């Protein structure tokens, strides 16, 4: 991928991966991530359904420079709405995992995600096992997102605001193996 040197985007922002302002897509400038997202969705009932690669839970995946393989809904949220604070989840108002429409995405804490899952009837029995901060849904996300050497225990721990040892236990199936 061609990349131009640019003045400092906000540190840690996914916008740092956009090599040109959104309004300047020309032959000279590589396609911004926002345009790549729009090229990989079909609009169905208001949802932007991801037609690129997906994980086994149905969440879209996209390659983001400096991040590697990233959940597409999280990338879309950051590109259209702003950075995701540490430990926060991106929730789907439409309950459609493959949807990346920023209007359907909102930021939630782990507790919000927990409540959301409960409301949707996906509350897993394992959540009573003492790992208060982690829900079964988040454990599933972590398992789906883990990629050796690319999306590591440490990176996932930072993403979800938990210890890397906790991530390792989830990946190894010591915990949340329901
Ligand atoms: Zn949607």
Image: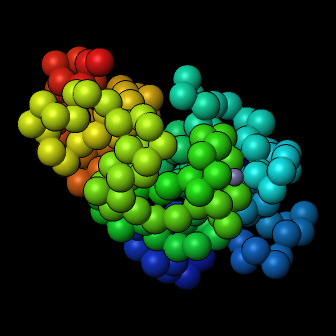
Quadrant in the rendering for residue 32: bottom right
Question: Residue 157: x percent and y percent?
Answer: 24, 45
Question: Residue 16: x percent and y percent?
Answer: 54, 68
Question: Residue 70: x percent and y percent?
Answer: 52, 44
Q: Nearer the viewer, residue 116 or 10?
A: 116
Q: Nearer the viewer, residue 141 or 11?
A: 141
Picture layout, residue 82 above or below residue 43: below
Q: Nearer the viewer, residue 60 or 64?
A: 60
Picture layout, residue 150 above or below residue 105: above
Q: Is residue 2 visible to the viewer in this orientation of the structure?
A: no
Q: Is residue 48 left or right of residue 79?
A: right
Q: Is residue 143 visible to the viewer in this orientation of the structure?
A: yes
Give me the residue at 73% from left, 41% from top: 50
Considering every residue shown, the one lying at the far right of the view is 27
Image label count? 0
Q: Nearer the viewer, residue 172 or 119?
A: 119
Give me the residue at 60% from left, 46% from top: 95
Q: Is residue 79 left or right of residue 11?
A: right
Which colour assignment does the render follow? rainbow
Picture layout, residue 136 above or below residue 47: above
Q: Is residue 172 left or right of residue 106?
A: left
Picture layout, residue 144 above or below residue 4: above
Give me the residue at 61% from left, 31% from top: 58
Image quarter where the C terminus lies is: top left
Considering every residue shown, the one lying at the far left of the view is 130
Give me the residue at 28% from left, 40% from top: 135
């Amino acid at each position: 991928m061609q990349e131009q040197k640019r003045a400092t985007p906000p540190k840690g922002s996914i916008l740092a991966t956009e090599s040109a302002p959104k309004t300047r897509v020309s032959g000279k400038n590589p396609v911004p991530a926002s345009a790549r997202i729009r090229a990989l969705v079909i609009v169905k009932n208001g949802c932007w359904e991801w037609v690129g690669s997906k994980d086994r839970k149905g969440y879209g995946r996209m390659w983001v420079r400096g991040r590697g393989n990233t959940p597409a809904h999280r990338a879309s949220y950051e590109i259209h709405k702003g950075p995701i604070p540490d430990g926060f989840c991106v929730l789907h108002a439409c309950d459609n995992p493959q949807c990346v429409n920023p209007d359907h995405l909102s930021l939630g804490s782990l507790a919000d995600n927990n409540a959301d899952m409960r409301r949707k009837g996906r509350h897993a029995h394992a959540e009573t096992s003492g790992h208060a901060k982690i829900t079964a849904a988040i454990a599933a996300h972590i398992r789906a997102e883990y990629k050796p050497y690319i999306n590591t225990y440490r990176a996932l721990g930072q993403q979800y605001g938990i210890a890397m040892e906790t991530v390792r236990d989830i990946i190894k199936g010591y915990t949340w193996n329901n």
